[in-house]
Image (spheres, helix red, strand yellow):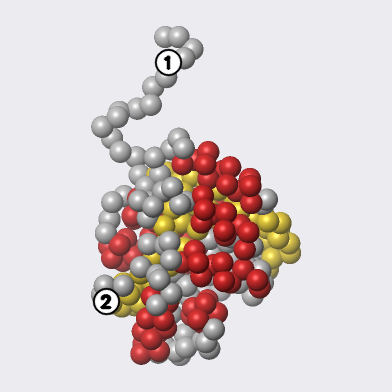
Amino acid sequence: MTSTQHFSGNPSVVTPIALTIAGSDSGGGAGIQADLKTFSALGVFGCSVIASLTAQNTLGVQGVLPIPPDFVAQQIHSVLSDIPVRAIKTGMLATADIIATVQSSLANYPHLPLIVDPVMVATSGDRLLAEDAMEQMRKLLARATLITPNLPEAAALLNTGVVSGRDAMLRQAEGLLALGVTAVLLKGGHDVQEPEATDLLLTAAGEACWLSKPRLQTRNTHGTGCTLASAVAAGLAKGLSLKDAVTEAKDYIHEAIRHSDALHIGNGSGPVHHFYRWHQA
């Protein structure tokens, strides 16, 4: 065998591959780190484009360093020009310029499902999206296969107050669809008045699906949004329908939260347990 020959495995076997474009969490509980853990836990190979660096732990975010947009674009091109990605997920994009760069870089890949988690504020309350980036974020939503805002993020995108209850959630989801979104998974976990954590999947075709799980009492919720969106992307990369991918993701995040107290990470809001299945075994 010469030095130019190589083996790439069985060509008849399709490897599900997902790409995350997000910020790095030095504490390991959210962002790129949570995304890659989720992909791996769900049987998907993960690629990554780092859009921002953070100095972060379970107590909060101590610093944010956005990556130059041209280098974000270079990372995206490097991955997509070579690796057969089957789904893309975005997380923390930090600035209007980075969001615009991601949008333009993905223009040549309209066939790839895109899950947009419109990250604005960390679990600790620290802001992760620049104030002047909101309008650019709304433009990115129109490219998305699915967006996954929580109730405060939905309110910010629509310039309304944070809502409570199913009727109000449905109206907000409809408002998000009016922005040009194809489908929205509106996460109701922040609605503490409800006995269950209830999310709403609403598509532009008018299909509504409510997904509820018992509310869990734990402080270890760092990275839940990143993990859920990445789990949906993993499902799409494996060829699941959107509804099935969302349902599988909801089940996965519930169990990851339920087992999170088995981990002892830091002194604040700890991460969910991405690999609970293996640790149990």
Numbered marks: total:
2
Q: With respect to residue 178, does 11 lie above or below?
A: above
Identity of the residue drawn at 50% across and 67% down: 139
**Label 2, residues with CA under 10 Å away: few <14, some 14-19, many ≥20:** few
Q: With respect to residue 27, does 205 lie above or below?
A: below
Q: Position of residue 25 (x, y in %)?
A: 62, 57
The amino acid beneath tag 1 is Gln
Q: Which mark identifies residue 216? A: none
Q: Quadrant of residue 61?
A: bottom right
Q: Which mark identifies residue 5? A: 1
The furthest residue to the right: 62
Frontmost of labels 2 and 1 is 2
Q: With respect to residue 214, does 136 lie above or below?
A: above
Residue 124 visible in the displayed image: no
Using residue 232 as the reference point, say whether residue 80 is left or right of it: right
Label located before the other in sequence (2 or 1) = 1
Q: Position of residue 41 (x, y in %)?
A: 41, 51
Identity of the residue drawn at 49% across and 40% down: 79
**Residue holding disc 2:** 206
The amino acid beneath tag 2 is Gly
Q: Position of residue 35 (x, y in %)?
A: 49, 55
Q: Position of residue 254 (x, y in %)?
A: 40, 68
